[in-house]
Amino acid sequence: MRLRRVLLFLALSVCPLFSLTNCEEQRVPEEKLLIVTVATQDTEGFKRFLVSAKHFNYTVKVLGRLEKWRAGDYMSATGGGQKVRLLKEALQEMKNEDTIILFTDSYDVVFSSGPKELLKKFQQAKHKVVFSSESLIWPDRHLEDKHPHVTEGNRFLGSGGFIGYLPSIREMVADWKGEDSDSDQLFFTNIYIDPAKRKSINITVDNKCRMFQNLHGALDEVVLKFEDGRVRARNVLYDTLPVVVHGNGPTKLQINYLGNYIPNMWTFETGCKACNERLLPLEGLQESEYPLVLIGIFIQKPTPFVTVFFERLLKLQYPKNRLKLFIHNQEAHHESQVSLFLKDHGSLYQDVRVSGPEEEVDTAASRNLAIDVCRKDEGCDYFFTLDIEVVLKNENTLKILIEQNLPFVAPMITRAGRLWSNFWGALSAEGYYARSEDYVDIVQGRRVGVWNVPYVSSVYLVKASLLRSELTDFHLFNSDILDPDMAFCHNIRKQGVFMFVTNMHTFGRIVSTETYQTSHLHNDLWQIFENPVDWQERYIHENYTYIMRDKLIETPCPDVYWFPIFSNVACDHIVEEMEHFGKWSGGGNTDVRIQGGYENVPTIDIHMNQINFEKEWHKFLLEYIAPITEKMYPGYYTKCATPLNFVVRYKPDEQPLLAPHHDASTFTVNIALNNKEVDYQGGGCRFLRYDCSIEATRKGWTLMHPGRLTHYHEGLPTTGGVRYIAVSFVDP
């Protein structure tokens, strides 16, 4: 007998030294484990829970599917009793006494690992029932002293997750006779703090978070662990890797953040593995079968490049007869642009509704109204918010968002050259902006995916079915303390609705309105500092960036370079701005605008500083002329010090030509602002020393040539119409 005991001891001791497969018979088979949860609604949180369970091949039993939730909310001191009742009823139906039950919440829970690890840790706990643990006691602080003390770890029980043998859990809930609205937390706490019951049922808490991680009171302890193509949560305080992660209490945003990665939703090795799983392609649909979308366009303040906004709206790749427009314009300054767009293109859309500044409807009211229009329209499938500041470069944006098949999704847009975007990765304790750990990586495209975030603005797509179910409140944008966008996101979060932002594609950007003035005719011209990318796209010639690569610079005369610089729009806007200003010089030698008051070679012109455009013009020269100068005149570097920048007007009956002269510059820039044979006849420039003329000038193209000594030149007669040129005398 003694020899037999020794051999048994040796077998048990040696087994762990060998392959795990040698000890399989000592482990609980994974098929004995059953996940039990309660879910009365198919929320996005519940779907996330099921996805994580499926990832690890858990078997899940869902209770309460057809019931109305009557057990309070997660912030209430009471509630949750309905879960205990449903569990008690379900356990009575279960016959396999060797089943191990994991009972857990679901809307705010994700699995971080699989059944094998969970069962191993449960067995190592050596108790019949193991509850999740918390560092904070709730809901009755008076019970603190009755909890067993621990040498290390959390003392207090958390009812949101526990694991145990079926008979033990059945015994534990046998005495439940409470109402659905009673507290499940208090019920289980009273059992745990009763020494006799705790011992009889053999209950403990997972005090070091080896199986369960409750986030409330532990946010500083939990980080993401990326390793070998896998992502999971790690508790750095106890150096443990919990299997079940629960965003209990007021930690919904944190579980949403972790759920962007766990379990393996996004890894450094594979990127976003689940981003295309829910796609609903529109390809193959007839135009008449496309979802009907109401686009809400909101103009709240003077905004640059509004005309460009409407041009891009027109280019959106989506059947116009499946789009309705709701345009709310609070700015009288933009009424002409709205009216012109609707006059030319409004008939393309199925329906158009306009609210103007005369109606005096504020931001929150207009957005509430627009959403309600879609909500009440039985044919409306989606509501698409599009603020006037949004620059949608991707013409397929609307299709891409619809194909994501999410209740709420926004395209990520950024502000050029900055870390600003239309989403927040986290919120401060006060509910304002906070930067999440992954925010910069997402904005800069180092992490690409579809992200669950707490705040979006400016542009987003909402399913109309969501507006008719969870988001039925008309006043979604109203709050006594929050601005409309923050109020909207707050009210959405309260309903447990997930807001997603995608950076799977490049969608566009948002313009800045901070310095936009409305005192000029074409105010967008002054945006070269605040919105340089938009300024370039609007005003710089489309071929400018190809000048060097494709050798677009021509040399019509010795050391005279000719290349495209301005778009047609830029030329038109500069001419119209000058004519709108209207204070053309008289063309005489006396000129108080210049130093010394005397002009040797006068022209009829307007100086850039007369219309407060000097700084913007200097910026243009530095950004777009100086790089060409340095290429074409090797060894010459310029800061574009410019004594004169001006627009010249030539007319047969006013000043048709300019006599031969040298320019008072190191080099001169001469940009044609209109078309020969269309706007004027004649004209051009002749370099006398080389007997070389450029007569067929091109609108938007610039002549760049040395000013002093070598390039004595004259302006050829304009014989008809009106010719305009922009001139800069540039020194180092």
Image: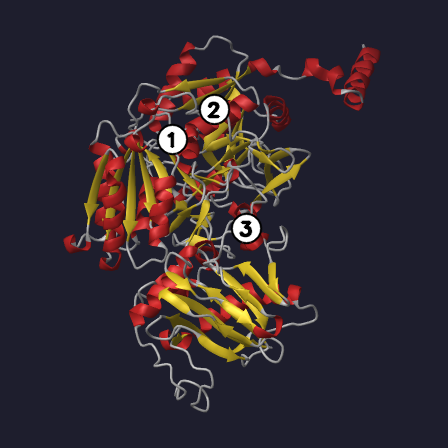
Say left or right for 513 vs 254: left
Q: Is residue 478 visible?
A: no
Q: Nearer the viewer, mark 1 or mark 3?
A: 3
Using the numbered discs, state the Cα–Cα distance from disc 1 to disc 2 in whole angstroms: 23 Å
Where disc 1 sits, the SS reads helix
Q: Earlier in the sequence, mark 3 or mark 2?
A: 2
Residue type marked 1 = Asp
C-beta proximity under 8 Å, tags 1 and 3: no
Question: Residue 354 — which label?
Answer: none
Q: Quadrant of the N terminus?
A: top right
Where disc 3 sits, the SS reads helix
Q: Quadrant of the C terminus?
A: bottom right
Residue 678 or residue 286, whichever sits in front:
678
Residue linked to disc 3: 440
Residue type marked 2 = Leu
Using the numbered discs, state the Cα–Cα distance from disc 3 to disc 2 in whole angstroms: 30 Å
Residue 676: image location, x then y, percent:
42, 59
Residue 216 lies, with reference to residue 706, above or below; the image says above
Residue linked to disc 1: 184
Residue type marked 3 = Val
